[in-house]
Image (spheres, rainbow, N blue to C red):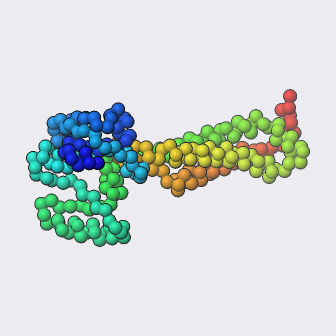
Amino acid sequence: MASYFAEQTACVVGEKLMEKNGWKLGQTVTLNGTIYPGEWPLTISEVYRATNPAFGDETMFFHFKYLEQKGMGGSGQVGVYVLDLTSSERSAAIAQQVDAMFENSSASTRTESEQAFQAGFVSMYGNVPFVLNVIGLAVVFAILGIAANTMMMAMRERTTEFGVLKTLGFSDGTVFGMVLAEAAIITVGGGILGALLAKLVVTGATTGFLPPLTIYWSSVALGIGIATVIGAVSGLIPAFQASRLRIVDALRRVD
């Protein structure tokens, strides 16, 4: 980090950002300013790797003095201050205290948690939670329809098998439970596999300006629970039809 502090145009770059752009350590890259117009040459003096997935590896950091002198004309205006608290229990009181200090100034502040700050950016994209909920429900109903159709087809193709089972003494309740268990095993197995893969693959994936995606174990458990419900619901009708099937009607289809 010595070279970073020694040079005003030095920068620190996230590992994924450097790999995405094909940059190398010590290379000088030029940014084209939008909010602050002009060309901004920066030399990569250090590369960081985030230990916390929520922090991300696709950010470039450079000296504020460089921005102040080249883009702000030495005014030194700051957009965001990040406060590192020793106790999260005091966050609300400290936020009120900070805002009270600048309440009557020309540069009043709005102090909030990082979660609320990020949620504000997400809200600019529209009602994201509503859209995700609608898409999620559509996917659940689509999978439910596919699972139910699969079980119905399996039940029709194995009608004679159910007839043989009943001939051997299997009760209607046993046949009902077997079909229902088969539907549950198929959907729960897929649900466990999909939820665990999402936890391993999607967690930490970056989404541009928004913070990296994070899938919690509670979400994994919810996905497995939904898969269990889908399996039970999709197997109810086929299981009921199989349990009510008469032996004569089932064996009539034997070639």
**Residue 26, picture quadrant:** top left
At x 31% / y 37%, what residue is drawn? 25
Q: Nearer the viewer, residue 27 or 35?
A: 27
The image shows a total of numbered marks equal to 0
How far across and how far down the image is residue 125, in percent?
Answer: 33, 45
At x 36% / y 57%, what residue is drawn? 115
Residue 170 shown left or right of residue 210 in the figure: right
Q: Is residue 115 above or below residue 47?
A: below
**Residue 82, picture quadrant:** bottom left
Which residue is situated farthest in the right direction here?
A: 168
Q: Is residue 235 visible?
A: no
Assign the C terminus to one quadrant of the image.
top right
Q: Is residue 218 visible?
A: yes
How far across and how far down the image is residue 236, in percent?
Answer: 69, 48
At x 86% / y 45%, what residue is drawn? 166
Residue 214 shown left or right of residue 108 in the figure: right
Q: Nearer the viewer, residue 229 or 204?
A: 204
How far across and how far down the image is residue 89, in percent?
Answer: 36, 70
Which residue is situated farthest in the top direction here?
A: 255
At x 33% / y 35%, what residue is drawn? 24
Residue 137 shown left or right of residue 107 in the figure: right
How far across and how far down the image is residue 110, in percent?
Answer: 24, 61
